Amino acid sequence: MEIPTEQKEPLCIHTFSGIAFDLLNPKPEMILLEDIIHSLALINRFNGAAIFPYSVAQHSLYVASLLPSELKLHGLLHDAAEAYVGDMVSPLKKFMTEYKKVEAGIARVVADVFSLSYPEPTAVKKADLAVLSAEREQIL
């Protein structure tokens, strides 16, 4: 990912494990499973609007449960980039071009670290959308 010309310095956040994670230049050594698990377990889906606390980690477990064994890790990690950038609500995300570029850059590195294909397989996206549909009916 190209760093915008006006952004010369690293743009870092600090993760649960204490790593300074550069959002614009993520490196494989910055991706730790413990950071992903911890953060996704604490990030609420739907901007906290569900009828009970419901995390991105829970959502990911449901997505993985719909997939064959060879795609389960894809399902578990399909939202892993959100551990670093948060879970932006979909209606707003459509307008956030730069955010989507940052998220995609992180997703590519996550895929490399865990030997996953990028972009995600169609079956993973279908499972994600199936879970989203059920979530809308049952918890919103």
Image (spheres, rainbow, N blue to C red):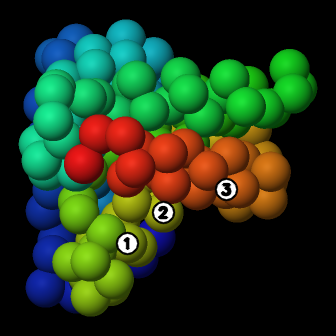
Query: Label for residue 46?
Result: none
Residue 68 appears anywhere in the view:
yes
* Alpha carbon distance from label 2 to label 1: 6 Å
Residue 12 appears anywhere in the view:
no
* Alpha carbon distance from label 3 to label 1: 16 Å
Q: Dot 2: what SS?
A: helix
Mark closer to the chain start, 3 or 2: 2
Position above or below: 27 against 104? above
Query: Label for residue 100?
Result: 1
Q: Dot 1: what SS?
A: helix
Position above or below: 57 against 56? above
| Amino acid bearing label 1 | Lys
Question: Residue placed at 39% from the left, 60% from the top?
Answer: 103
Badges 2 and 1: C-beta atoms under 8 Å apart? yes
Q: Quadrant of residue 95?
A: bottom left
How crowded is the residue under tag 3: few (<14 C-alpha within 10 Å), some, or many (20+)? some
Closer to us: mark 3 or mark 1? 3
Question: Residue placed at 56% from the left, 27% from the top?
Answer: 62
Question: Residue placed at 26% from the left, 77% from the top?
Answer: 91
| Amino acid bearing label 2 | Ala
Residue at mark 2 = 104
Q: Dot 3: what SS?
A: helix
| Amino acid bearing label 3 | Lys
* Alpha carbon distance from label 3 to label 2: 15 Å
Residue at mark 3 = 125
Q: Position of residue 54 (x, y in %)?
A: 25, 29
Position above or below: 25 against 60? below
How crowded is the residue under tag 2: few (<14 C-alpha within 10 Å), some, or many (20+)? some
Compare residues 100 and 10 and report the one nearer the observer: 100
Mark closer to the chain start, 3 or 1: 1
Q: Position of residue 50 (x, y in %)?
A: 18, 41
